[in-house]
Structures are given as C-alpha cells and as structure tokens.
Image (cartoon, helix red, strand yellow):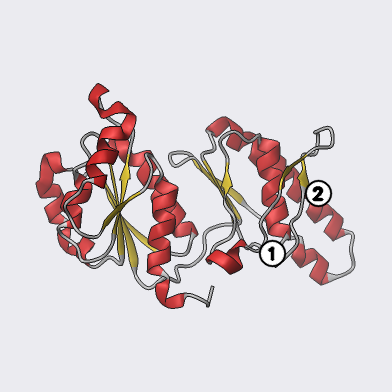
Amino acid sequence: MQKEQLVECGDAAGFAFARPDHDRAARQGAGEVIYGEGKTADQIAAIAAALLEGGQDRVLATRVDAEKAAAATALWEARERERCATAGEASSLAAVLAAWPVAVTYYETARLLVFGGMPEPDGDGVVAVVCAGTSDGPVAEEAALTAQFLGNEVERFYDVGVAGIHRLLDVADDLARARAVVAVAGMEGALASVVGGLVACPVIAVPTSVGYGASFGGVTALLAMLNSCASGVSVVNIDNGFGAAFQASAINHLNRRGER
C-alpha cells in the first residue's frame, strides 16, 4: 500500500487538512472522491491535484455549489497554465505531454465537479436511473453522472412517478434490460417498490427530501423504501445519489473485479 500523503492548503498557516488515499482504487475498484460540502475551493483543488499526481486518472468532487465551483475552476485553470508554461521550457517531449492540461467540468444541476473528463463505459450492462418527478432531478443527476464517472453506460427515465403510473409502465421493458436500477423519489417514496416489482435486477432506492410537511425532509420516503415488500430493493440515505450510483456501479462491474 502506498504511503499517505499530506496536503497543505496553499494560503493556510501550515496545517495539513487532508490525507489523499492513493491506494483506494486498488482496494475498491474506484479512486477517492472528494466530498465538497464544507471544504473550500482551495482545498478541493489541492486535493484533486494530489490525487491526480498520485496516479488517479480522474477525480470527482460532489456537493459543490456554483460559487465554489467557479472559484475552484479558476484556481485549477491557473495551476494548469503554470504547469504547461513550466513544461514548455523543457526540452523533453515527454515532459510536455505529461503536463498536458487536465480539464475541469462543472455539472450544476448535480453539483458535481469532474477533473479529467468522463471515461468510456466498461461495465457489464446498463445502469438505469429512474426519477419520480422533476423536483427529484438534482439527486437523480448526481446518481446518473456519478455512475457515468465510474465507467457505466447510463439510461435516464425521469418524471415517471406513480401519480401517473402509465409513464413508468411505458418504459418497463427498458428497465427490465438494466443490470441495476437506481430509483429516486421523494413524497411517499412508492416508486422504488413498484420498480422492484417490475425488474429482476437489484434496485437501489434513493429517498429525497422533496415533499410537503409530513414528508419530514425525506424521512417518510426513507421509511417507506426500507419497508418495501418488493424483493431486491436496497436503500441508501436521503438525497444520496452518489452512494446509490457507487453501489449500482459495483453491481455492474462484478464480472470485471480484479481488472480495474
């Protein structure tokens, strides 16, 4: 296992705020992901740089608001310009290629920052992301884009909640072909149970905090999903699109364990 690396914020007074886990991909099949909420733009950019320098091909940062994303992007682009300028002074072509700029992309709806771009899918099949209503879209997009980042082909089926169940039945054949389904719903959380009764693959249910007062910020949907009578339904935390996508990706890569 690689030795832990301390990362220090460039403008901080000498305290180390993170220990990037360079060995995580070898242990878990996917590299470390940055949880952006509560971190500064400086910290996000510094951790991403350390992970890439440690051998990770790309880095995902979750729960990054638009203002913080803009600041982190500006810091990142300044860093990349400096790296390229330094490499340009070198005589070695290898040095120039090694310093080729790493792009950063922000997905505002999902609040995700991606350093290094999306990979080509290498899973066993398709991960389907099913969303009850448009208001659940940000959590569903977090799940869909995270699954793409982890190397999965993703199909989205949005606004197919049980209030108009014919919309879900219209895509039932597509869902049946999926390797795993992520079902995202707030309100009473019934979508996951219905999907669980339609498909043979695992269903990862994501309760959202969408709903009126008695939804208790997603607790009602969470409890409904936990009490589902449909076989094959597992449940992650409220609004945890990332966790659901990671689980779906693990399922979709079971036949490739050891290759990644």
The residue tagged with tag 1: helix, strand or loop? loop
The residue at 30%/27% (across/down) is 216
Q: Which residue is mark 2?
A: 82
Name the foreground residue: 87 vs 154.
Answer: 154
Q: Which residue is mark 1?
A: 55
Asked if residue 185 shows in the view, the reply is yes
Asked if residue 160 shows in the view, the reply is no
The amino acid type found where label 1 is placed reads Gly
Name the foreground residue: 40 vs 222.
Answer: 222
Vertical placement of residue 95 versus 32, above or below:
below
The residue at 74%/57% (across/down) is 4
**Residue 189 numbered tag:** none
The residue at 30%/67% (across/down) is 179
The residue at 48%/61% (across/down) is 150
The amino acid type found where label 2 is placed reads Glu
Classed neighbour count for the residue bearing mark 1: other residues with Cα under 10 Å, few (<14), some (14–19), many (≥20):
few
Q: Quadrant of residue 44?
A: top right
Q: Which numbered mark, 1 or 2, is in the foreground of this view?
A: 1
Residue 243 x %, y %: 43, 50
Q: Is residue 42 left or right of residue 129?
A: right
Vertical placement of residue 243 versus 151, above or below:
above
Classed neighbour count for the residue bearing mark 2: other residues with Cα under 10 Å, few (<14), some (14–19), many (≥20):
some
Q: Quadrant of residue 96?
A: bottom right
The residue tagged with tag 2: helix, strand or loop? helix
Residue 8 x %, y %: 78, 43
Residue 32 x %, y %: 59, 55
Name the foreground residue: 101 vs 151.
Answer: 151
Q: Quadrant of the C terminus?
A: bottom right
Cα distance in 3D space between marks 1 and 2: 20 Å
Mark closest to the chain's N terminus, 1 or 2: 1
